[in-house]
């Protein structure tokens, strides 16, 4: 059986979206002739912990761990956060206004820690892995980012050993959605672009999660770029839960940052509750995960607190149950504004949450561009309804349609799109790419 060394920062006990992709690939790679070895951090500062995900790690898998130093202890002192508190990811502000210290820390992140705060782990990791590889040969290297420092570890190993290398991007690098928040200097922006270019050009193959990312990278490199989307694990949906019959719950799972705040949707809900007493009695908005303070402020200002359920982070398997119990699932696309182009366009977003929503077999209410990648998946799969960011009337119509289905207890329609996004199918596709570069 061929061996692949996977260099990944996010690994159980990390929770959240970043860990899912390669945890699931590792889970199924043996079925397709590949034995994975994982290299990860021993003491990482993960924003979210989810120990339940360790059950997905296959028995007997070699997981190499080395200590990592991250500057988060200094960051916590700077912003007045307690040592035991976790740093929230995604530039999400849970309470209050952003302080000067927080703004300063973002500037430091963008201009000093290039490409990211894990840069100090690059050299120690390269030394350790070069030594380990001398007696433990592998056929392919894989790096997955962000954090993009993982690609720089793999790049150095590829240069020194000649082992074929696949660079996997879960998000863009220089064109990532929060790039503007980092207030990068011209030097920092050029340095990131140079490192990104080196990784793209020197890797044997690049994988990305969406067609828009492929277009972006193909304009920057001659290296082949392939799309392997995120997906859902059939094992997570073996136990089927029934929709909540007590209330019609519109459920969102995962974090909601300020760009995912949907004030027009909240207004549509207010209007329906005022005009339809049955809807007002039955409706609940259920938000599962971390929420930016702007979300709570918007909902409170419109008088929706009484019908809103706030649930903090849940283990992944519990989230799948909550998704299946929903009357409908809310897919909130980042709204960057129509003036922004490239990957910053909301049309480019293809969130991993969408694929688990498909597997949950509950109707989806997507708020975002009607001509986006996500909208195409929802519509072509018969999975739900799509409304533009400001189309309040369309939102009201969609909510009433979904409420009617729930009230009539209509059986769930299993999306025709779901099967192609199974983690098993996606792992088979990834294994084929590994075979391709291993034979070069």
Image (cartoon, grey):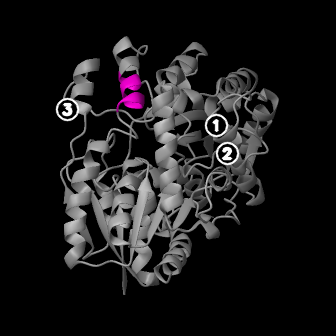
Does the magenta-highlighted stretch encompass residue 109?
yes
In this view of the protein, which residue sits in the foreground, 134 or 266?
134
Q: Which mark is residue 348?
A: 2
- Quarter holding the N terminus is bottom left
The answer to whether residue 52 is seen in the rendering is yes
Residue range corresponding to the magenta coloring: 105-112
Which quadrant holds residue 47? top left
- Name the residue located 38 percent from the left edge and 73 percent from the top edge: 163
* Label 1 crowd (10 A; few <14 / some 14-19 / many >=20): many
Whether residue 383 is visible, yes or no, is no
Which marked residue is nearer to the observer: mark 1 or mark 3? Answer: 1
Q: Mark 3: which secondary structure?
A: loop
Q: Which mark is residue 344?
A: 1
Residue, x 28% and y 34% (percent of image)?
A: 86
Give the main secondary structure, helix, strand or loop, of the magenta stretch.
helix
Badge 1 or badge 3: first in the primary sequence: 3
Task: Report helix, strand or loop for mark 2.
Answer: helix
Q: Are marks 1 and 2 in contact (CB under 8 Å)?
A: yes
Mark 1 lies on a secondary structure that is helix
Please tell me how many numbered marks the rendered image carries: 3
What's the distance in space between the residues labelled 1 and 3, CA to CA? 34 Å
Q: Which mark is residue 84?
A: 3
Q: Could you tell me how far apart the alpha carbons at marks 1 and 2 are, in whole angstroms?
A: 7 Å
Residue found at x 64% / y 28%: 262
Q: Which image quadrant for residue 100?
A: top left
């Amino acid at each position: 059986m061929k061996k692949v060394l996977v260099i990944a920062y996010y690994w159980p006990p990390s929770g959240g979206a970043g860990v899912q992709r390669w945890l699931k690939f590792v889970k199924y790679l043996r079925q397709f002739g590949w034995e994975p070895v994982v290299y990860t951090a021993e003491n990482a500062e993960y924003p979210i912990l989810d120990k339940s995900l360790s059950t997905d790690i296959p028995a007997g898998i070699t997981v190499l761990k080395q200590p990592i130093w991250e500057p988060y202890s200094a960051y916590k002192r700077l912003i007045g956060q307690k040592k035991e508190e976790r740093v929230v990811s995604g530039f999400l502000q849970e309470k209050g206004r952003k302080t000067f210290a927080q703004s300063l820390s973002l500037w430091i992140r963008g201009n000093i820690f290039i490409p990211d705060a894990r840069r100090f782990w690059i050299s120690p990791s390269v030394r350790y892995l070069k030594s380990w590889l001398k007696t433990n040969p592998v056929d392919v290297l894989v790096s997955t980012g962000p954090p993009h420092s993982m690609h720089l570890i793999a790049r150095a190993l590829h240069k020194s050993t000649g082992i074929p290398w696949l660079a996997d991007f879960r998000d863009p690098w220089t064109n990532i959605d929060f790039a503007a928040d980092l207030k990068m200097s011209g030097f920092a922006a050029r340095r990131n672009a140079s490192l990104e270019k080196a990784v793209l050009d020197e890797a044997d193959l690049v994988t990305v999660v969406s067609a828009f990312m492929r277009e972006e990278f193909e304009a920057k490199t001659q290296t082949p770029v392939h799309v392997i989307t995120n997906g859902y694990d059939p094992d997570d949906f073996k136990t089927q839960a029934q929709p909540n019959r007590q209330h019609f719950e519109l459920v969102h799972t995962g974090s909601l940052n300020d760009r995912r705040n949907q004030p027009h949707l909240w207004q549509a809900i207010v209007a329906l509750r005022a005009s339809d007493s049955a809807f007002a009695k039955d409706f609940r908005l259920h938000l599962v995960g971390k929420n930016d303070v702007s979300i709570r402020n918007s909902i409170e200002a419109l008088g929706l607190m009484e019908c809103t359920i706030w649930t903090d982070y849940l283990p992944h398997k519990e989230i799948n149950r909550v998704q299946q119990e929903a009357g409908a699932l809310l897919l909130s696309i980042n709204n960057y504004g129509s003036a922004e182009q490239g990957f910053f366009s909301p049309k480019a977003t293809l969130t991993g949450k969408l694929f688990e929503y498909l597997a949950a077999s509950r109707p989806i209410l997507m708020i975002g561009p009607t001509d986006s990648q996500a909208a195409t998946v929802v519509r072509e799969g018969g999975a739900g309804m799509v409304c533009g960011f400001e189309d309040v009337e369309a939102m009201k119509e969609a909510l009433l349609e979904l409420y009617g289905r729930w009230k009539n207890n209509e059986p769930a329609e299993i999306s025709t799109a779901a099967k192609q996004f199974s983690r098993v199918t996606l792992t088979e596709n990834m294994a084929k790419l590994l075979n391709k570069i291993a034979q070069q």
